[in-house]
Image (cartoon, rainbow, N blue to C red):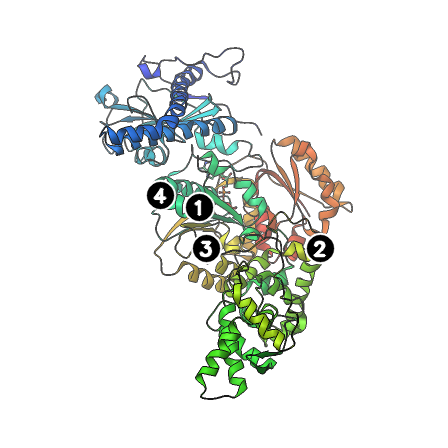
Amino acid sequence: MSTSNASTRSTGPSTGLPAERPTGRPRGPHSALPEGLPEDVVEQIAVEQAHVDRVHEELEKAGRRADDVQAEGLARGRIAKSAEVGLEEAAGLFERDALMFHAAKRRTALDTQYEGLVFGRLDIDHGMGPDASTNGSRRRAEDREIRYIGRLGVRDDDYEPLVIDWRAPAASPFYRATPAQPMGVLRRRVLRSKGPTVIGIEDDLMVPEAPDDLVIVGDGALMAALTRTRGSRMRDIVATIQAHQDEAIRASARGVTEITGGPGTGKTVVALHRAAYLLYSDRRRFESGGILVLGPSGAYTAYIERVLPSLGEESVVLRALGDVVDAVNTERLDPPAVARIKGSTRIRPLLGAAARGRVPDAPTEFRAMVSGRAVRLEARTLDRVRSQVLRQHQRNAATKAAQAALGEAAWTSLGITGDREAKADFLDRWEDHLEVEAFMQAWWPQVDPREVLLWLADPDLVRRHARGALSGDDAALLAESFRVALETGTWSVADVALIDDLAARVGPVQEEAREERGFYEIEELDDLSSYGVTEVQPVAAPARESAGTVRSDDPRDRLLAGRIGKPDDYAHVLVDEAQDLSPMQWRMIGRRGRHASWTVVGDAAQASWPDPSEAAAAREEAFGTQARQAFHMDTNYRNAREIFDYAAKVVRREVPDADIPQAVRETGVEPVDAPLGADPLASARAAVERILDEVDGAVAVVTPSRYAARLEPLSGSGGGRVQVIDPMSTKGLEYDATVVVDPDEITRESPGGIRVLYVALTRAAHRMTVLS
Ligand SMILES: Nc1ncnc2c1ncn2[C@@H]1O[C@H](COP(=O)(O)OP(=O)(O)OP(=O)(O)O)[C@@H](O)[C@H]1O
């Protein structure tokens, strides 16, 4: 597909108003403008280029000024103090210039990677009545205002705005004005740029008739944006946000904001713009508290990662579900039956029992001479003490408490009553006794939550701990899945939520306190030698390397690499594809949003988690009692109507109440149904070759696992444009074209059945071939 050229819709004569006079770069032999543009479009582009050039010059100046000011900044503050100039004023100056400096730096990135810094213009008539009825003859020049809208705000030396940040209230009419409610806007103009060069213009007229001096060109910005090649990365939509999307973007930051809608309705992109808006509207709160954006997969985070930086926001944390817990990063998916066991809260009692249970290989008996008395504690006593301590403490923070409780139990076991002094002496010795300490290291070691999970590779232990909560088959499946982890050295995505649950139970692994033992050691050694103990070998805590540095061949080392700390707490959590989160995953995310407001994005018809009511309960628990606001998106901006109709027909068969949006764009080309022949690679290759000729940009071959290996040779073909991908991993993604292989098999193999097929059938913007 090629980009649509601006074309003249209707034009009025140029009146010679200063703002409309073409003063920018002329179109020369090296011009970036497409050939064959009508002359009035070229003129209009030149007008806008002149303004864009001015903005860039101003930023250039600001950059240079900021260099000086940075060096001078603190000094200025100091002078300000001594010279009794308001400190606030000086700080304000510095802050503004520093901001401009950062803006200038950012601009370089924007210019090279993204579309223009200045992307919009409003021509406003302040004399216009609310019904837009004022006719041309009553319009007065002094009522007119031109406002430019951009990715960041820029002012000139007189502090006059040259560009308004798209998130500022003054930019709101750019998104909200409609011909029915023009909000004073005569013409909305979208500028399309390559770096600092304006290459196209799309106008929307908001009044019934263009005033004589306003030229109207282009086919409308939205259609131009939607017909463009998509490529392999999501783009921001800052120039073409629609009014109903803008409402969700600018909605109150408080509570829980739910954004629902069918495939391709812009839920993800709207949510990302909302994150940028929240940062703008309350930077202190959201930048320092942090915004977490959570998506289903690494492919998804890679797909969306450019959107926020293109909006000038770098401080948002993007995580995939396999990547939420520090030191663990995985894409491996369990088979659906296993993922279902691990995702349900039914597994919690099992995890609780494992976290409270005996450490495998820990001693089951304690024997030593303490304070001249022979102490012997059996397994039952050790278990009782452990349970008692863990009722009140996290295991990793309870070493001291456990040692003290064990001391009490030891004293009780001696059967001495009434001798307070002897007890005090005994407990005193107990506290610093080397044998007790050595025992504690073996009996009460610091445990990594991941080790606790690996204990469950033992099917007997799983059965014992599950105490009937899991069937025998489920217990065996679960244990087997942890054996897979031990063999491959990789966790599964579903494991991550279990690790997090266990981390909350056992607490962070404490660094070993390196206590100087001083004279206590000498006293204790005296004590030991008198009872014939010659050597005590304390158990050293295993040394850990931090994540990413472990290159071990041992799968177990790879599983346990890095350190798991406390979960980060965020000020705002944005969850995309929320319909797919399992209850255990909701609990994991909830731990990161205890004080957060939320934006939650989803579509039930695309769900792959099979038990929505259990997930809903876990989700409610994560949100607490916060206020809710809901936004529904009902226009599909991704799929050509022909492609979406095909997908909608398929899903309606089994999900009659699916939320079906309206697709806004037609290509006149129906999806192609073709046979999947005896040689699947040959069939898919033929389909891919046809499609590569028809579209520019990214092409996906969406295949069930059955054909994945056989189709792999297509990966990277078409000059790197073709990707072979499984249906679940296409969640949230988009391609210019897709080849969907064996839809029946996709339905059969996927946990969400037809809903996952629906996802696969709604990924293509322009062309789709289905091989059945
Ligand atoms: N106002 C808009 N202007 C231009 N493009 C838009 C607009 N709104 C949405 N789009 C485009 O529509 C496509 C679909 O958007 P997005 O991926 O956010 O939809 P979604 O609702 O999250 O889809 P799904 O649920 O299928 O993953 C994207 O290419 C996005 O850029």
Q: Would you say the residues marked 1 and 3 are in contact, meaning their CB atoms lie under 8 Å apart?
A: no
Amino acid type at circle 2 is: Asp
The numbered mark, 4 or 1, whose residue comes first in the sequence reads 4
Q: Is residue 448 left or right of residue 253?
A: right
The numbered mark, 4 or 3, whose residue comes first in the sequence reads 4
3D distance between C-alphas at marks 4 and 3: 19 Å
Residue matched to label 3: 592
The numbered mark, 2 or 3, whose residue comes first in the sequence reads 2
Q: Which circle, 1 or 3, is nearer the viewer?
A: 3
| In the foreground, 157 or 405 | 405
Amino acid type at circle 1 is: Asp
Amino acid type at circle 4 is: Arg
Disc 2 C-beta below 8 A from ligand 1 = no
| In the foreground, 620 or 648 | 620
Which picture quadrant has residue 677?
Answer: top right
3D distance between C-alphas at marks 1 and 3: 31 Å
Amino acid type at circle 3 is: Arg
Is residue 200 placed above or below 442 in the rendered structure?
above
Mark 4 Cα shell of 10 Å, populated few (<14), some (14-19), many (≥20): few
Residue matched to label 4: 284
3D distance between C-alphas at marks 4 and 1: 34 Å
x%, y% of residue 667?
A: 55, 34
Residue matched to label 2: 554
Mark 1 Cα shell of 10 Å, populated few (<14), some (14-19), many (≥20): many
> Helix, strand or loop at disc 3?
loop
3D distance between C-alphas at marks 2 and 1: 51 Å
